[in-house]
Image: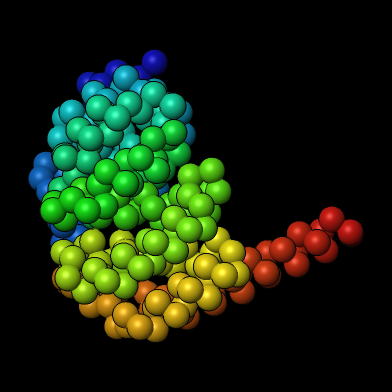
Amino acid sequence: MASLAGVMAELEAAGSEKARKTYARHGAQEPIFGVSFADLGIMARGIKIDHPLAVALWDTRNHDARQLAAKIADPAQATTKLANQWARDCDSYMAVDAVVGMLGRSVHARALSDQWRDSQGEWVASLGWALAGFTAEDTDAWSAADLSALLVQIEAEIHTRPNRVRHEMNQALIMIALRDGELRRQAVATAHRVAPVMVDHRDTGCTTPEPTAYIERIFAHREKMAARRAVKDTG
């Protein structure tokens, strides 16, 4: 069983100044070791799921430790108390992206999205919208009417919300379109009415995708993968 001290030493040894500067440019807050995503993945696969260690890593406040924590945390053990603590602690979009991957697989995902989407805090609201996008295709979490209502809210608010919240609302719009044909039609219509969505990505080279084209690319990719599976199944 991995120890907190041992994992922190491994993270520090794996860090690089180049990655640290890159993460800082993307908004990550110190302390940062600068561990690559590839190395984080290797470490996570070696540790597997270790929820107590994940909690301890998160509590160090180290950026890389928190990235690893989100990878090895157990969604089944993620209480709403823990979720709210981690949400309050998020201080960059990188932290949000890490946390949503874990909380999106918890039984609390929909309730947390409902709780956080209208928050005045940029990162908490971003997390709420990111959870909506992450779970949009889950029919147990959202009805079609629920998602239609989110599209109405996106159209009404996307241009007035904080910077990164706009990005996550745009992403949610895209994911809602993947649910079914009618929601795809509604989402594309909404995208046309709200375009363009302006998000400041600072000096990173990142962009916020134009929803209509992005939706079409996702469907084209899915159709291509389905065709490949069909050929394999009949081969």
Q: Is residue 89 above or below residue 208?
A: above
Residue drawn at (39%, 35%), measured in percent from left and top?
A: 108
Of residues 206 and 112, the one drawn nearer to the viewer in this rendering: 112
- The answer to which of 91 and 24 lies nearer the viewer is 91
Q: Is residue 38 left or right of residue 161?
A: right
Residue 113 picture location, percent across and down:
33, 46
Residue farthest left in this picture: 30
Residue at 31%, 72% in the rendered image? 155
- Residue 189 seen from this side: yes
Q: Quadrant of residue 203?
A: bottom left
- State the image quarter where residue 44 is shown: top left
Give the residue at the far right of this rendering: 235
Picture quarter with the N terminus:
top left
Q: Quadrant of residue 133?
A: bottom left
Query: 213 left or right of 159?
Result: right
Where is residue 109 drawn, in percent x and y? Answer: 39, 40
Q: Position of residue 228 (x, y in %)?
A: 75, 64
Task: Kindly identify the residue that appears in the image at 57 percent across and 70 percent down.
Answer: 182
Residue under the image location 27 percent in, 43 percent down: 115
Residue 77 spot, x, y in % from top left: 39, 24
Is residue 72 among what the camera can see? no
**Residue found at the very far top of the displayed protein:** 1
Q: Is residue 82 left or right of residue 202?
A: right
